[in-house]
Image (cartoon, rainbow, N blue to C red):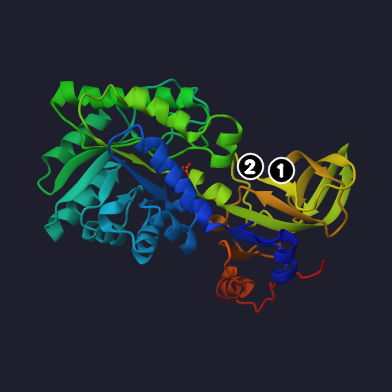
Amino acid sequence: MAGRDAEELLAEFGSPLMVFLPDRVEDNVRSVSEAFGSRFPDVSVHYAVKCCYYDPVVRAALRAEAGIEVMSNLELQIAELTGCAPERLVINGLGRDEAYVQRGVRAAGSLHVLDTWDDFTAVARGATNAQQMVDVAVRVVPQMPGDLDNAMPLDSKLGNDAGSGEFWRLCDAVAEHPWLTLRGLHGHQFTRASSPADYGRFLAGLAAVACEAVTRKNLRFDVIDIGGGFDTRSKLEANGTPLSAFADVAAKELAAIPYPFRLIVEPGRYVAADAAVGLTRVRARKERKGFTWQVVDLATNTLIPVPGAEYIPISVRSSEGEVKTSRLGDGTCAPSVICNDISLPETVAGTPLAILHCGAYTTVFAHIWGPRPPVVLALRDNEDPEVLTDPRAFSEAARAVYGYELDLGPDHSP
Ligand SMILES: Cc1ncc(COP(=O)(O)O)c(C=O)c1O
């Protein structure tokens, strides 16, 4: 990793470790810009910061000329503190509080995506009070088949149905408001999208909404925001469906829109997931009901088993011993699983393992519960590792939250 040996890192910093690779973040953002930028004349990539907050990750995305997509006041502040220009912000989220609305309105030139009437009222009031024009996109759920691979359920809380008229009523209200400008159409419908064909079915629906807006109201959206939702880059590429395949279907389906527009893409997982590697040691092994369990010390308090979570362990030593099919678990007394049925060379207690795809929707959800928290590093070629989270920080948080003085430092035993 970035020229460093995994075992040396474990020896130096202890176990467990999370290693973020900002150069990979930068490269991932550029690959999104290239895939869509070579097919659309005007493309803007906005990193969905909700998937990872660490400063070197966010700044790497900004270095690759990404904007930022936020869903809360907390995230908006991260975007501002890392230097994202206001006109490079997409502001999302439902049920916004006053502080979030006001901060967003002050970010002149940002795009506010509205999904509920209450958010319309709050943003309209904020814009009116500040006497500030605010650019708005309305979130839609286009008409599309209900069984698309890895699409959100059609009855989720998110988006407004084009078919029911709700979406059009919200558009009218924005267009008629003196301090709001209706700029964009927003759709985000997938998580871990891996089928370009199904992605195309969603985009065909989105293009149909944009076309209907022309015939129905002579309304043109300057911005078409297709959201994020792509699977991990290295996984897509290993499976032979690189992002260019998604950009191809986007170019094909969105060509139906009869006017020029700016395309916004909001990837989170694609940017961050394969930009972090977990390093851990096997602490115990166990055979049960025909399965071999490897119990590791990078635990589900960081590798959160959210639905669909996929972490991929690999051996960091050149293979030795018989390859076995294993399951990976942690030391908690919960029946949680880090991953199922993977092939690993035989281990002993202390064997180091690397776990791939740890960068997105992991540390943002990490909590102080049960197992030892990880040391978190940022690692760049030819530079010393930068410690992003020292376990002392977790100890301080534990003191603030629970009131105990705890020693949560890393384990240096081999
Ligand atoms: C509006 C919006 N845009 C972008 C994203 C990023 O999604 P992903 O990390 O799957 O690319 C999300 C994720 O929840 C989202 O809600």
**N-term-proximal mark, 2 vs 1:** 2
Secondary structure type for disc 1: strand
Residue 393, can we see it? yes
The response on whether ligand 1 sits within 8 Å of label 2 is: no
Hey, which quadrant is residue 394 in on the image?
Answer: bottom right
Mark 2 vs 1: CB contact within 8 A: yes
Eyeballing the image, is 31 above or below 81? above
The image's mark for residue 387 is none
What residue did someone put label 1 on?
339
Density class for disc 1 (Cα within 10 Å; few <14, some 14-19, many ≥20) is some
Image: 224 above or below 216: below
Please state if 365 lies on the left or on the right of 89 as rendered.
Answer: right
Q: Assign the N terminus to one quadrant of the image.
A: bottom right
Taking the image as shown, residue 337 lies to the left or right of residue 284, namely left
What is the CA distance from the residue labelled 2 to the residue labelled 1?
7 Å
User: Which residue type carries mark 2?
Assistant: Glu
Q: Which residue is mark 2?
A: 310
| Closer-to-camera residue (81/102) | 81
Residue 277 found in image quarter: bottom right
* Residue 123 rendering spot, x and y as whole percentages: 22, 51
User: Residue 93 at what x, y percent from top left?
Assistant: 36, 48
Q: Nearer the viewer, residue 179 or 266?
A: 266
Find numbered disc 2 in the image and state the secondary structure of the residue it sits on: loop
Instruction: Please indicate, yes or no, whether residue 268 appears anywhere in the rendered image.
Output: no
Which residue, as the protein is rendered here, is positioned at the far bottom? 405
At which x and y percent is residue 352?
A: 78, 57
Q: Residue at left 74%, top 39%? A: 340
Q: Report how many numbered discs are placed on residues in the image.
A: 2
Question: As drawn, is 176 to the left or to the right of 341?
Answer: left
- Which residue is most to the left? 178
For the C terminus, the image quarter is: bottom right
Q: Amino acid at mark 1?
A: Cys
